[in-house]
Amino acid sequence: MSEEIISSLKSEFADSILKVFLEDKKILVTVKKEGFYDVLSSLKGMGFDHLSDVTCIDYIKEQEFEIFYHLWAHKKKLRVSVKVRIPRDSSSIRSVTDLWTGAQIHERENHEMFGVNFPGNPDLSPLFLEDWEEIPPLRKDFDTRKFVRRKYYGEE
Amino acid sequence: MKSNPEKEETFVPFHLPFGPQHPASGHFYGSVKVDGEEVVELEPYPGYLHRGLEKLMEYRTHIQNSVLVDRICVLEPFSNEMGYVNVVEKIAGIEAPERAQSIRTIMAELGRILSHITWIAIVSLALGLDSGARIALGDREGILRLNEVATGGRIYPCYFIPGGVRRDLPEGFEEKTLEELDYLKSQLNLYDSLIFRNETFVTRMSGVGIFNAKEAIALGATGPNLRGCGVESDVRKDEPYAAYPRVNFRVMTMKEGDAYSRVLCRRGEIAESISILRQLLQDTPKGKFRIKMTTRTPKGNAYFCCEAARGELCFHMVSDGTDKPYRVKVRGPSFSHTLSEFPYLARGAQIADIPAIYWSLDPCPPDMDR
Amino acid sequence: MGMMATFRSIVKRLRGILKPLVISRYLTTKPMTLRFPEESLESVQGYRGRHLLEPEKCIGCGICVSVCPNNAIELVEFMGQRYPQIHLGKCCFCALCAEYCPRNALKMTRLATISIFDRPSAVYGPEELSKLL
C-alpha cells in the first residue's frame, strides 16, 4: 500500500516533489514550496485525514525555515511526513486550515514562536505570550539566558 | 441572538469568565459569551503554565533532558519519558534491552491508571460530587507508593533514560503491585455505584458535547475522545512499541460521541490496564536493564508517537551531531482538545454544561502550554 | 404497557439515586489521612531526599557539576581540597549527581523535610552536606 502511494505521488507531482522514500514504515516526502498545497490536498484525498502536527525548524546558517506536516490515515494505518523549505526573511506559506480544521491552532503557535506568516488562517493573534516585544522566542538568535539575566536580574 | 425589531436594540453578550480562579477550571481561562443561559462563543486563553520547555531542552544534553521531560504532563508521569527516550534511541540507532522494555511498559500502564484515577477525582469534583473526589485522591496513594518504591520519587520519577531504565525493580515489587491491582479492581465497583451509574451524573453527562467521527478527526481528536465517537484508533495497537506486541487487550470504543461515552471509555481503560499489567507481571524477562549510549547522537530527524492517557503524544527531534538536540517539538494531546474541540463543543450549550464538557475531554494544561 | 414501563423506570432511577450510599462504609473505616506532624508517612529505602557527602571519598573531579541539569552544584575550597556545594533551591532532586559520581561520595538519603526562612540558607556547603542531622 505504501508503494502505491509513493508511485502515484511520483507520477502525479513529478515537478514539485524533490524526494520521496519509505523509511521504517513511514513515507517521507520533500516538496518545493510552489506545489506543496496540491500534494497535501491529494494526500488528504488518499485518506490521510488526521493532521498530527505542524513543526517549524530554524536553520539559521542556511537562512531557511523548514516546515513539517505529519499526517496519519486512520483507515490505512499509515504515516506520512511532508517537509517544505521557505526563506527566513519575510517567511510566509499558505495555510492548510481549509483542509484540516485542527491546523489553525498549530499555525497560530508557529506564528507566535517563529514569526512565520500563514495567509488564509482566520486568527493569528498571540497565544501564550503577553506584551512580548522581543523577536519570536524559538528562533536561534534569541538567547533565553541573556534575556533572563537582562530583564530579571538587571545584568548586561 | 435576540433582537427586538421594534426597538432595534443591538445584542450585547454577557461575558462570563470560566477560570482561572474557579474550582472547576484548572489552569485555564475560557472567556465565555452568553446570551441568557446559552453559550454563544467561547474563546480560550491558554498560557498560564508556559515554561518554554522546547527552548530549555536545546541547552541541555540528552541525559539532562530526560529529567526535564517529566514536567510536560504532571498528572501522568511516565508517558512523556517514554516518548522522549524512544525518540532519542531512534536517532542514535540503539535499542533498549528486553527487560528494560518490559519494565517501561509496566510503569507506563501504572501511570495510565494513576492519571485516570486523578481524572475521576477531578471530574466528580467539578460536577459537585465531593465524595468521589476524596475517595479517588486517597486511592492514588497506593500507586504513588509503588512509584516511590521503584523509582525514588512519587510524582516526578526521573526513571527512564536513553538506553534503558536507571534502576532495577526491587525485591517484592511484583507481589505489591498485584495486591494493589486487586484493590483497584474492587474499587472500580465502588466508583460505578457512586459516580458512573449515579443518576445525576448520567443525566448531566448524556447528550451534551456531541460530535461525530468526521468532525472529531478534522479537529484533531485522539485518545479516548476519539474512541468515544466510534473510531477504533490506539497507537499501542497501530504502531506498537516497548512490550505492547506481547500483550492482548481490547480497545474500548463507544458509539454515541457524547460526554458520557467518553467517560465510559476511560473507565473501561482502567480495567484493560489492570489486565495488561497482570499479563506483564507474570513473565518479566531477565537480563540487563540498561546499555550505554554514546554522548553524541548522529545527525538526523526522528518522529515518535506514543499513547498517553489523554491521546497521542508525539516527539519530533532534530539532531545536528552534538550532544544537545537542535530542536525538540512536543505535540501534547491536550493542545487540540482544549483549543480546537472545546470551543467547538461549547457553542450552543447551557452554562451548567460547560464543566461537564470540559472535563469529559480530560485536558491537562501543562501538556497544552509546555 | 404504560404502567409497567413507568414502574421500571422509577425503580431504575431510585436505584441510581440510592446506590451511592454504599460509601457509608467509609464511616467505620480508618481515615486515609494522617495528623502531621505527630504521625507522618515514612519514606522508603531508595527515596531521593537530601544529599549526603562523604568527604574522604571525594576527589574533586567535577563530574557532578557538569551533569547537573540546573547548574545547582559548584566546587568550593574547604580544608585544602575542592568539594561540592549544592544550592537546594535550584536542585530538582533527580539524583544524577549521585549516580554519576565515580567514587560514590555523594548519596541521596531519605530526608525529605527541609525548611528554611531565607533564600541564602538554601546553599548547603560541604560541611553541612556531610552531616545528616
Image (cartoon, rainbow, N blue to C red):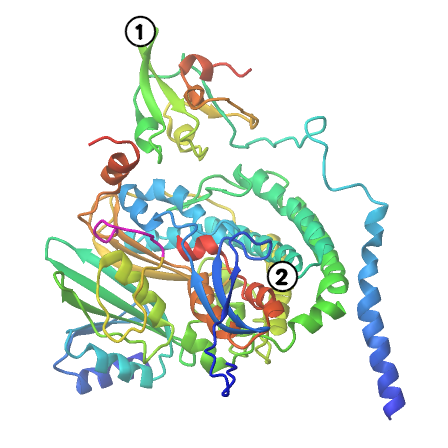
**Which chain is indicated by disc 2?**
B
Does residue B292 appear anywhere in the picture? Answer: no
The residue nearer to you, when weighing A41 against C67, is A41
The residue nearer to you, when weighing B117 against A132, is A132
Place of residue A115 in the rendered image (x, y in percent of width and height, measured from the top left) = 22, 60
Q: What residue is drawn where x is 44% and y is 34%?
A: C92
* Left or right of A16 in this view: A101: right
The residue nearer to you, when weighing C118 against B74, is C118
The dot on residue C80 is 1
**Which chain is indicated by disc 1?**
C
* Left or right of B134 in this view: C88: left
C-alpha gap between disc 1 and disc 2: 58 Å
How many numbered tags mark residues here?
Answer: 2
Q: Is residue C6 above or below residue A142?
A: below
Amino acid type for the residue under numbered disc 1 = Gly
Q: Residue furthest bottom?
A: C1
Q: What residue is drawn where x is 64% and y is 69%?
A: B264
Place of residue C93 in the rendered image (x, y in percent of width and height, measured from the top left) = 46, 33
Mark 2: give few (<14), some (14-19) or many (20+) Cα within 10 Å: many
* Magenta stretch: helix, strand or loop mostly: loop
Chain part drawn in magenta: A128-137
Q: Is residue C56 found inside the magenta-colored segment of the image?
A: no
Q: Is residue B37 above or below residue B305?
A: below
Q: Which residue is mark 2?
A: B270
Q: Secondary structure at mark 1?
A: loop
Place of residue B86 in the rendered image (x, y in percent of width and height, measured from the top left) = 38, 54
Amino acid type for the residue under numbered disc 2 = Ile
* Left or right of B269 in this view: C69: left
Q: Residue furthest top?
A: C79
Q: Quadrant of residue B185?
A: bottom right
Mark 1: give few (<14), some (14-19) or many (20+) Cα within 10 Å: few
